[in-house]
Image (cartoon, rainbow, N blue to C red):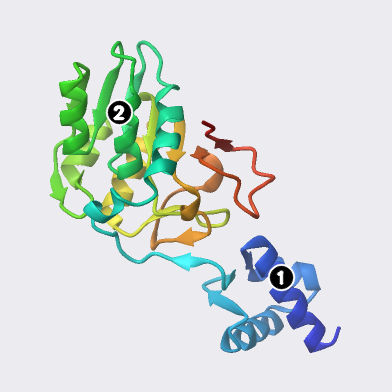
Amino acid sequence: MLAEERLSKITQRVNEQGSATAQELMEYLNASESTIRRDLNTLDAAGEIIKVHGGAMSINTSFKMRDDEIADRRITNIEEKKLIAQYAAGLIKKDDFVYIDAGTTTEFIIDYITEKNAVYVTNAVNHACSLSHMGCEVYLTGGRLKSATEAIVGAETLEALSKYNFTIGFWGTNGIHKKTGFTTPDREEAGVKRMSFMNCKKRYIVADASKFDSISPVGFADFDEAVIITEKQVKGYEDCKNIILAKK
């Protein structure tokens, strides 16, 4: 196979899938590791793909390196978040032991909760106050308050969450990608998400379509480990069985 044809096939494969590992490309093109790595360097230099450790990603993938201030996120994609939140709230049943992650989409869930005969746990001060004012039984984890997201994080938070076994939970995320899964910028916050996530039976990621094909530095779960509730179909994810579209 000519080099030009191989480069074209690599670019097409990466852009179609969003990403590809070096091993995957070696098998796909029946090429050596050194050849694939050289090709990835060439394509990265030309701006055709983004070379990453162990493979490559599409140039259409966005990278989110830090959290936006929560005040800014509260006024972004409001109608989409409300639609997602309303669907999510309807999944809570009597006697559920519910975890609600910090975040603006999860915050909207509280506005639509009608089930008072459930127990709620959260790592967000504002969430806890809202649930308490509604007359719900709610527990707030201890730890350090992170001002940018109003999330409680740290060793005390992890210790508290390690004792719980949730029947259902809802998490926000900064990025959703088939290869890298669910990601967030902050390592401590990722740890809290991961702990609560792994101690939950039914796991739901609540995120609007803008979060797809976006990657942040720290992963907290694989793509197939949760059901995603979003507001519309996203190109490249049409065949995913773990996506629910919230409808009006």
Q: Residues within 10 Å of mark 1 (few under 14, many from 20)?
A: many
Q: Identify which residue, 148 or 186, lies in the foreground.
A: 148
Q: Is residue 60 visible?
A: yes
Query: On residue 178, which mark appears?
Result: none
Residue displayed at 39% across by 64% down: 64
Residue displayed at 52% across by 73% down: 52
Q: Identify which residue, 236 or 161, lies in the foreground.
A: 236
Q: Is residue 181 above or below residue 140?
A: below
Badge 1 marks a residue whose secondary structure is helix
Q: Is residue 127 above or below residue 147?
A: above
From the top left corner, tell me how far across and down residue 145 is, in percent.
Answer: 14, 47
Residue displayed at 22% across by 52% down: 71
Q: Earlier in the sequence, mark 1 or mark 2?
A: 1
Marks 1 and 2, how far apart at CA: 47 Å
Q: Identify which residue, 140 or 93, lies in the foreground.
A: 93
Badge 2 marks a residue whose secondary structure is helix
Residue indicated by mark 1: 25
Residue indicated by mark 2: 111
Which amino acid type corresponds to the residue marked 1 in the rendered image?
A: Leu
